[in-house]
Image (spheres, rainbow, N blue to C red):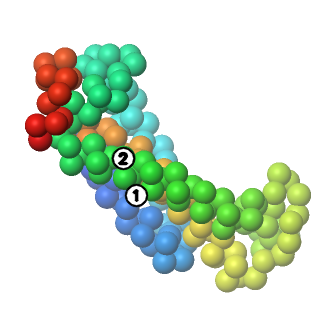
């Protein structure tokens, strides 16, 4: 069962990575493939089981050392890198969004913030804002698919591993 969840998580991570790379190049994936938003819901298919399984093996509030001991070092380093990237990507996405959402109102492309019209957009700007929007989400998808993938495919019960095992790797 864990392997199945791991493979589903890997598929979600791979799809999110493809979407993210395309968004970074300015492609509005949601325009060409609206079902891409299914990746958002797909997180719950793997993340909820991850939470329940990991609480059994790692406990309800594992320390970083316990988490580190439960995985090969390369998984910990990659996971930390993906998490840091997701945070940086979020900040850059917010800057690029001008704190507004692209929308179509009365047949015009506009930027809207909290229901208020910020400014009109050209078709090219609208597409760029939509790509930025999907980029923000896909950056988070990477982190939320990687965690269950790492746990289900590489995780070990941290209670059976010596506390200083990470130093020996």
Q: Quadrant of residue 127?
A: bottom right
Question: Where 134 sits versus 108, above or below?
Answer: above
| Rendered position, 108 above or below 102 | below
Residue at left offset 27%, top offset 43% = 76
The residue indicated by pointer 1 is 16
C-alpha distance separating marks 1 and 2: 17 Å
Give the secondary structure at mark 1: helix
Q: Are marks 1 and 2 in contact (CB under 8 Å)?
A: no
x and y, in percent, of residue 159 in the image: 19, 17
Residue 95: image location, x then y, percent:
67, 63
- Hey, which residue is sitting farthest left in the picture? 168
Of 115 and 83, nearer the camera is 83
Foreground residue among 14 and 162: 162
The part of the image, by quadrant, that contains residue 18 is bottom left
Q: Residue at x 42, y 70 (%)?
A: 21
In screen coordinates, is 166 left or right of 99? Answer: left
Q: Is residue 135 left or right of residue 100?
A: left
Q: Which mark is residue 60?
A: none
Point out the image quarter for the N terminus: top left
Residue 80's mark?
2
Of labels 1 and 2, earlier in sequence is 1
At 84% from the left edge and 75% from the top edge, which residue is drawn? 120
* Neighbour tally class for label 1: few under 14, some 14-19, many 20 plus, Cα within 10 Å: many
Q: Residue 62's x, y, as percent?
A: 35, 22
* Dot 2 alpha-carbon crowd within 10 angstroms: few under 14, some 14 to 19, many 20 or more: few
In percent of width and height, residue 15 lies at: 36, 59
The reply to whether residue 49 is in sight is no
64 vs 38, nearest the viewer: 64
Q: Quadrant of the C terminus?
A: top left
Eye-nearest disc, 1 or 2: 2
- Secondary structure of residue under mark 2: helix
């Amino acid at each position: 069962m864990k392997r199945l969840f791991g493979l589903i998580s890997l598929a979600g991570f791979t799809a999110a990575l493809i979407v993210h790379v395309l968004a970074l190049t300015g492609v509005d994936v949601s325009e060409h493939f609206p079902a891409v938003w299914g990746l958002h819901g797909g997180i719950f298919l793997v993340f909820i089981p991850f939470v329940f399984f990991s609480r059994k093996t790692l406990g309800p509030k594992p320390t970083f050392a316990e988490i580190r001991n439960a995985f090969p070092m390369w998984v910990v380093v990659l996971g930390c890198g993906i998490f840091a990237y997701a945070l940086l990507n979020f900040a850059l996405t917010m800057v690029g969004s001008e704190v507004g959402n692209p929308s179509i109102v009365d047949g015009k492309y506009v930027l809207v913030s909290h229901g208020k019209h910020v400014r009109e957009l050209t078709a090219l700007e609208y597409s760029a804002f939509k790509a930025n929007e999907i980029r923000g989400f896909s950056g988070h998808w990477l982190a939320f698919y990687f965690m269950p993938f790492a746990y289900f495919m590489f995780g070990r019960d941290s209670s059976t591993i010596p506390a200083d095992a990470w130093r020996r790797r």
